């Protein structure tokens, strides 16, 4: 296949920026698409071309396959990279792109569809010898059958909608007497939410860890894994901190879980970059959870420790160049942590925030990578995910990665929307995080929204008060330029400060 | 010597600070402390102040947001929102009852009004939910900080609102 | 030895910032020192404490050992990291620090002194079996002796002052008839410049490559190397682009040269981080040039490919923890390039520039590291080296590193002083750079100051002209805020642009 | 419709550009081209313009430096200094002789005057060195761009100078 010379990025925010950078690093021209409110978004500024695809709501722009495909045709792009979210796991879109003679940088529709159906993927995995959570592989409609299965696997059990996802369509059942009504409710919800009321029963694993494995497949059965990530720091079923490698795996367990992921991808002749998610039970057993058939938000931690470029790998597979890594050449070096920077308020149950980025100082120096979708002056729109950027920090070992992360988070200033940088600083101080024992219930159990911020010491408080008073005093005496003072030229600020910071000697 | 007192509010705490200027020297008094010379510099294009306190250097990032002395500060990675105003203004505000909780429930983030849970004339108690605003697919229920009677409701379900927009106005009860 | 809890950084600019970051990454408190013009320099803002040490000229501040030592004592720092330049290779200062009961993070005075004397280090190296450039090991005063040596090693030869350095105190002699006057002049200059008129003769290697090897020693004879760097892109005898590994070495030559560096450091029981510099002749022979007994400007390229932290390694050695790496654990992964960002004008013979940093947009994303000493609004002082920052770019291979570097350099915006980012973009397009064949005469030979910038195509030129005219039109119509418009709030800018960038559909 | 012509100078090239505004639409004419609608946005806090030209998007970073329409621009990693002024101002300057080379040798970087190579009354030719300024340990020899007679020398060796400071003023010869 010929090399791509122009690729359309069907996404927005930090992942669109990262993909554009990856394409630029390959010398490929880039096309962005944007909605009404994203006219000045960073991904638009960075692309070589940009096509307007509709109003702000995603279902009128970023989710409309026809518009995205038309933009690709209009600009002469040979391929479309979907990023994550939006159209990335939409089989119909993948098919539509291929039917139009363009290349979808990702798996086929069939691969997405088998992995999007929990019952189908369970059956497939069990047949391939990948451990799945004990339970049924068939939809259950009769409460008696459900009770019989529960008796076999042991309570508590989980009723799960086959078409569910993102924490929706699930219900925990702790005893037989609850089964009938729970099954009725779950089926009802599943039918209403997903148009498919198939529900099955599996053992409910309490307090697990979330471990996932990065894989790359060429579509003809060749698969390599690029090690695991641990993503157990979650709030509202969404990851906030990820790390690579996982602090929870012995070398043997790592090998087993990575091999299970390869088996999973091989079972469907997977093509592209994908992530096989597992839950790791407190007893050390792990079970297949689902496969995400796309680039993952947290892919940079894998890149940092393995020295790979997953976007390049995806583009090369889509070009027909095969997998650019051999399993035996892939190694883990050091440790990487990723911190998702969300516009949200940790002290108010992580409620989303919004607004103009008034001030932004990104951290710099050794071990620091920032994948960002914002800039000073950008208005964060209300319509999309509140993730603004990702700070990824690499260290020679986990201890150094944690220490560097604290430094980088303290160097990082963001004014405007309320954000979760203080949450990350909190997490890095928690014993369960430091020793790696944290599970998916970490935030729920350990996070006290009212008191998570450490007291400032007296000197720091006094310095803050004095600085704020000085700031106000300078702002008010700044002649004729009241409101804009904070952005004004620094000469206005120095009127009598020039000689005040005298030395100690 | 030019001397001015500032009142700072952060969460529920109030702090006083005096800034005194005399030619090229600046002195600061925080709370009950003494008026002492302070070493500071405005840096990063006026977006931060580097200040020496207790032997340590502190870099305080500062951004003026909106009017009324609202300031966003970051010190050692901790973002803090303060209000800062000079004493005269603070006193004027206080005499207007600005010190008490407001009877106006305002939007704090941009969003869509999804549901209004009260009617004009209805009596509400502190903590009662009055309106639901949706932003980024999250529904946020706003509660009243005063006990009183709903005076007016300037918005309707479906209205887009911006931060600061009044959503429900409550006439506080005397002593409420 | 006890762990350090507070360390003074006796430097300024990007290296002081990088060392402060490294100390923060170890949980060690930091003390900065600063001169009059550096009151608001970035290294001062980032340190926990800062001590004023005098007027702007370095010989009244950063070069005054007494002042730096007093600052360390006053603040209770247990050790001093000298960075590079300034006091870093000053034996008297190292001795003074140790005599005061503090720790100098670097080698002993004796090690610096033997390596600071070219004749002494030549003798030492020859005795240790490290290849040195053919020539004498003794000072020459008699032209007849010099002519005899030249006849033996072959013309051209180099007359070199034993105490010289930085390209000073050297003279090429191409035939016997030039020898007498050249020797007289070189001795005269050496006496006047260095207070030591010892001069020796060695073969002049034309068109060499500059290869250097990073070493770490524990002071008791244990030494590891952290591979080589190639630093042949130089202007005015100063490096501007460095890379690790070198594109010029076969695996065997790499092993030989790295072993020679280890031998060099072992010969003096070297302590700390050091760099052994070699010249590589066109015929593949390499020769010891000198050893820099300090952290090198270009150390980040080594860190990026070897996954090490050389500042941490130095601090640990100084603490008595020994070398934190075993030779067999050190490996090369990928390729790193460093671009020194100088305030200088490539089109005017690299004349230094100066001024306020008016606008600064650092590059972000995968593979990019920025070690910087500047910020928006900082006034670059006239008194020191014009290096502002270093952009370090890592790639999986040299090709990717070059492609990423182009992207990062294009993302990097700096307004204020004239700078050399366009020079770097030029270098990355040159055949001699791309194929790795460049030598130290690369800039002299290939760089055409008048015509090095590629022509802008018509569309780009038109876009630039239109944008500048629009900028001016908005600036002038911005009511009452003429001069500050470029920093003003964006609302002033949007008056009628909001609807103009309509889509193509 | 509001229409204004701008004159841009870069190196020795001069370009004209017309900006026309009509309500919400902006049109631009570059050089001899047609007046055509332009898609552009001011971005990065007013520090850059994103503009569509020839099917491509160009991000042009722009900083106004000093007065007189001097603008620093960066496009695709290439920094460029331009002067931009409206036509009337450009014409006024030209009638004052601003179009010809200046007889004033000014400092272009801050530094110390090290040596003055001419004396008042001395005749000089284009390219003659007239003054040496040291900055960052580099000596920079400045030459005259006109032929003429040295009128005055406002500085002495040892003086610190800033960019724009006049160092040597030369009365150009007629036709020089």
Image (cartoon, coloured by chain):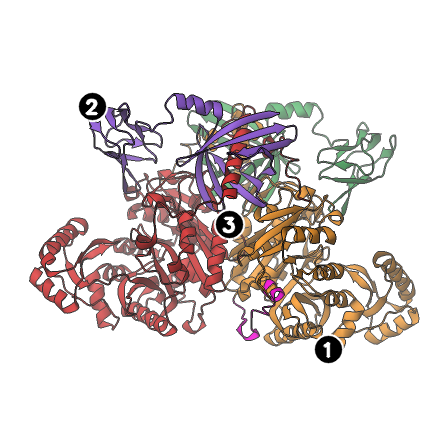
Chain colours: A orange, B green, C red, D purple
Question: x, y percentage for residue C268?
Answer: 27, 67
Look at the numbered discs 2 and 1 and tell me whether their residues touch, using CB distance below 8 Å: no
Give the CA distance from mark 2 to mark 3.
53 Å
Question: x, y percentage for residue A185?
Answer: 89, 60
Give the CA distance from mark 2 to mark 1.
97 Å
Q: Residue at x 21, y 60 (%)?
A: C117
Judging from the image, what secondary structure is the residue with disc 2 in? loop
Q: Nearer the viewer, residue C321 or A51?
A: A51
- Report which quarter residue A208 is drawn in: bottom right
Q: Are marks 2 and 1 on the same chain?
A: no
Image quadrant holding the N terminus of chain A, namely bottom right
Q: Are marks 3 and 1 on the same chain?
A: no
Residue under pointer 1: A128
Circle 2 or circle 3, nearest the eye = 2
Judging from the image, what secondary structure is the residue with disc 1 in? loop
Image quadrant holding the C terminus of chain A, namely top left
- Mark 3 crowdedness (10 Å alpha carbons): few <14, some 14-19, many ≥20: some
- Judge whether residue A325 is colored magenta: yes
Give the CA distance from mark 3 to mark 1.
45 Å
Look at the numbered discs 3 and 1 and tell me whether their residues touch, using CB distance below 8 Å: no
Residue under pointer 2: D121
Residue B15 appears in the picture as rendered: no
In the picture, measured across the screen, residue C406 lies left or right of residue A21, that is left
Which dot marks residue C363?
Answer: 3
Q: Is C325 drawn above or below residue A473 in the view shown?
A: below
- Judge whether residue A354 is colored magenta: no
Q: Nearer the viewer, residue C208 or A338?
A: C208
Q: Chain of mark 2?
A: D
- Mark 1 crowdedness (10 Å alpha carbons): few <14, some 14-19, many ≥20: some
Q: Chain of mark 3?
A: C
**Span highlighted in magenta in the image:** A315-333
Q: Chain of mark 1?
A: A
């Amino acid at each position: 296949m010929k090399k791509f010379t122009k690729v359309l990025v069907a996404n927005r925010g930090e992942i669109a920026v990262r993909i554009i950078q990856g394409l630029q690093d390959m010398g490929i021209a880039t096309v962005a698409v944007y909605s009404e409110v994203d006219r000045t978004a960073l991904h638009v500024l960075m692309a070589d071309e940009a096509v307007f695809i509709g109003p702000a709501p995603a279902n009128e722009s970023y989710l409309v396959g026809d518009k995205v495909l038309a933009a690709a045709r209009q600009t002469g792009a040979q391929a479309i990279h979907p990023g994550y979210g939006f159209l990335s796991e939409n089989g119909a879109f993948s098919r539509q792109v291929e039917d139009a003679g363009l290349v979808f940088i990702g798996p086929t529709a069939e691969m997405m569809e088998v992995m999007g159906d929990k019952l189908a993927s369970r059956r497939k995995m069990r047949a391939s010898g990948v451990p799945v959570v004990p339970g049924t592989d068939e939809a259950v409609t009769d409460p008696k059958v459900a009770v019989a299965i529960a008796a076999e696997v042991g309570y508590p059990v989980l009723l799960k909608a086959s078409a569910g996802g993102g924490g929706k369509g699930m219900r925990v059942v702790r005893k037989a007497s609850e089964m009938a009504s729970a099954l009725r409710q779950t089926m009802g919800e599943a039918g209403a939410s997903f148009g498919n009321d198939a529900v099955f029963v599996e053992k409910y694993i309490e307090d697990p860890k979330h471990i996932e494995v990065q894989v790359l497949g060429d579509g003809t059965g060749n698969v390599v894994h690029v090690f695991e990530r641990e993503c157990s720091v979650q709030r509202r079923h969404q990851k906030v901190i990820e790390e690579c490698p996982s602090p929870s795996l012995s070398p043997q367990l790592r090998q087993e879980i990575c091999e299970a992921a390869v088996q999973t991808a091989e079972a469907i002749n997977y093509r592209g970059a994908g992530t096989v998610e597992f839950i790791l039970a407190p007893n050390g057993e792990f079970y297949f959870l689902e496969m995400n058939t796309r680039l993952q938000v947290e892919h940079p931690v894998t890149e940092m420790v393995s020295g790979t470029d997953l976007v390049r790998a995806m583009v090369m597979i889509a070009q027909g160049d095969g997998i650019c890594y051999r399993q035996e050449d892939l190694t883990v070096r050091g440790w990487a942590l990723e911190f998702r920077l969300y516009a949200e308020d940790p002290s108010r149950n992580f409620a989303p925030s919004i607004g103009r980025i008034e001030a932004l100082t990104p951290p710099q120096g050794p071990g620091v990578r920032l994948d960002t979708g914002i800039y000073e002056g950008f208005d964060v729109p209300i319509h999309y995910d509140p993730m603004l950027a990702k700070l990824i920090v690499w260290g020679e070992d986990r201890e150094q990665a944690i220490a560097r992360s604290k430094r980088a988070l303290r160097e990082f200033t963001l004014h405007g929307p309320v954000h979760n940088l203080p949450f990350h600083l909190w997490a890095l101080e928690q014993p369960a995080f430091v020793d790696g024992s944290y599970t998916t219930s970490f935030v729920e159990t350990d996070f006290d929204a009212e008191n998570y911020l450490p007291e400032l010491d007296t000197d720091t408080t006094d310095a803050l008060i004095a600085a704020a008073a000085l700031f106000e005093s300078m702002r008010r005496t700044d002649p004729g330029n009241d409101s804009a003072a904070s952005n004004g030229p620094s000469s206005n600020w120095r009127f009598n400060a020039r000689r005040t910071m005298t030395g100690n000697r | 010597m030019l001397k001015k007192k500032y009142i700072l509010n952060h969460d529920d705490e109030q702090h006083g600070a005096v800034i005194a200027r005399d030619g090229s020297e600046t002195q600061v008094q925080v709370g009950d402390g003494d008026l002492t010379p302070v070493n500071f510099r405005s840096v990063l294009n006026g977006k931060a102040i580097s200040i020496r306190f207790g032997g340590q250097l502190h870099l305080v990032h500062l951004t003026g947001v909106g009017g009324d002395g609202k300031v966003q500060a970051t010190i050692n990675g901790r973002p803090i929102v303060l209000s800062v105003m000079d004493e005269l203004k603070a006193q004027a505000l206080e005499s207007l009852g600005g010190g008490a909780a407001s009877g106006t429930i305002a939007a704090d983030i941009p969003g869509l009004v999804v549901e209004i849970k009260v009617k004009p004339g209805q009596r509400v108690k502190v903590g009662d939910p009055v309106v639901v605003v949706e932003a980024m697919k999250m529904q946020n229920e706003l509660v009243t900080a005063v006990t009183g009677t709903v005076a007016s409701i300037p918005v309707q379900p479906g209205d887009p609102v911006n931060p600061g927009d009044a959503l429900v106005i409550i006439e506080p009860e005397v002593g409420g």
